[in-house]
Image (tube, rainbow, N blue to C red):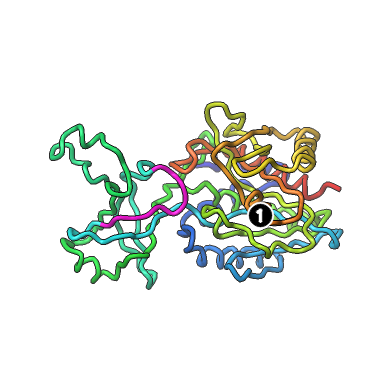
Amino acid sequence: MYKRFLGGKKVMNLDLVNTLEMMKKYLNIPSPGGYTLNAIIEAKKDFEALGLSVHFTKKGALIATLRGEIDDEQLTISAHMDTLGAMVKEILPNGYLRYHKIGGGAWASIEGENCYVINNKGEKIRGSITFKYAASHIYGQEKANSERNENTMLVRLDEKISSKEDVLKLGINVGDFVVMDPRFEVTPSGFIKSRYIDDKSAIAMVLEICRYFKDNNIMPKYTTNFYISNFEEMGHGLSSAIPEKTKELVAIDIAPVGEAQTSSEYSVSIAAKDRKSVYDFYLRNKLVQIAENSGIDYAVDVFNSYSSDATQAILWGADLKFACLGPGVSATHHYERTHITALENTIKLLIKYMLAK
């Protein structure tokens, strides 16, 4: 369907169809915070196929390196593989599950969503997220409208069960991961709808950037490391494993679109500040100048309830210039939406940045 929107054309020799296919692939590999290994192993294969050297950090993240003209000073671009999710907290006597959230988001944001529970053997048990008082025919309208919280939001398993013992026989235990269906869709008008656009879109964009350099037989100005982090939603994505030659760090993350924000679903947003830090003024303005000189649709924005791999790295003591950019996304940490042009503008800005002196 999105192929009709793109018309089979390549912009700046970008393969946006492949970008969307890669995004779909990674959205279909569950990777809530703490359960990212399968997705990161897949990324390792994709980076190696593009000719990059790769290695794992002790924490389980992945760093892929694209050689540049200058190696003594390097760039690092981060994207996080971990997503929101949930973890089994309690198995109730009737077989329902209470859960803790992994990452942010409102309790009501996943109500009614289909899901899987992944046990410690890797087996997936189908279920859905339900509200304890969802049946207004039983509980009445007042309770049906009551607060969604850790005591009232439950996992209902799609198995013939009626007790805690039945659940345990399925191999489900406290600490198992719960992952929601992403429901990825691209409309004929180019809108991308899915859970976990944050930050699976960035994974797809990074791989497209690497493909661009390989297929066009060009090198970035500086050796560039792509740091695929695995705990960003927990607040500690990057670690001291950032390559020591890094002079600038750019985190790719979604930009919330909404009231009082300048971000849009069609442009790339460059963060000036988030709730943890002001971003480096020099690097931010460098990105702005590149966007303006290249005719890239961009916005500069300030985010109140937000942080990124970049500001997380600075707070644990990384000594480098740092920035954050990404596509504008509607309904972040919910059922998210962006437009293919936002991905296009983000990719173009990063490529131009990597080629700049």
Name the main secondary structure of what is drawn in magenta.
strand
Residue located at (31% from left, 41% from top): 148
The type of residue carrying mark 1 is: Ala
On screen, residue 315 versus residue 356, left or right, reads left
Which residue reaches farthest top? 260
Q: Is residue 6 visible?
A: no
x and y percent of residue 250 in the render? 70, 49
Residue 104 part of the magenta-drawn span: yes
Q: Is residue 345 visible?
A: yes
x and y percent of residue 81 in the render? 55, 57
Quarter location, residue 231:
bottom right
Q: Is residue 51 above or below residue 301?
A: below
Viewer-proximal residue, 164 or 334? Answer: 164
Residue 82 part of the magenta-drawn span: no
Q: Which stretch appears magenta?
A: 97-106
The secondary element bearing badge 1 is classed as: helix
x and y percent of residue 168 in the render? 25, 69
Q: How many marks?
A: 1
Viewer-proximal residue, 326 or 44? Answer: 326
**Residue under numbered circle 1:** 313
Residue located at (48% from left, 41% from top): 336
Give the class, few, some or many, for how many residues have Cα within 10 Å of label 1's Cα (few <14, many ≥20). many
Residue located at (55% from left, 50% from top): 199
Quarter location, residue 273:
top right
Q: Is residue 227 above or below residue 341?
A: below
x and y percent of residue 343 in the render? 62, 42
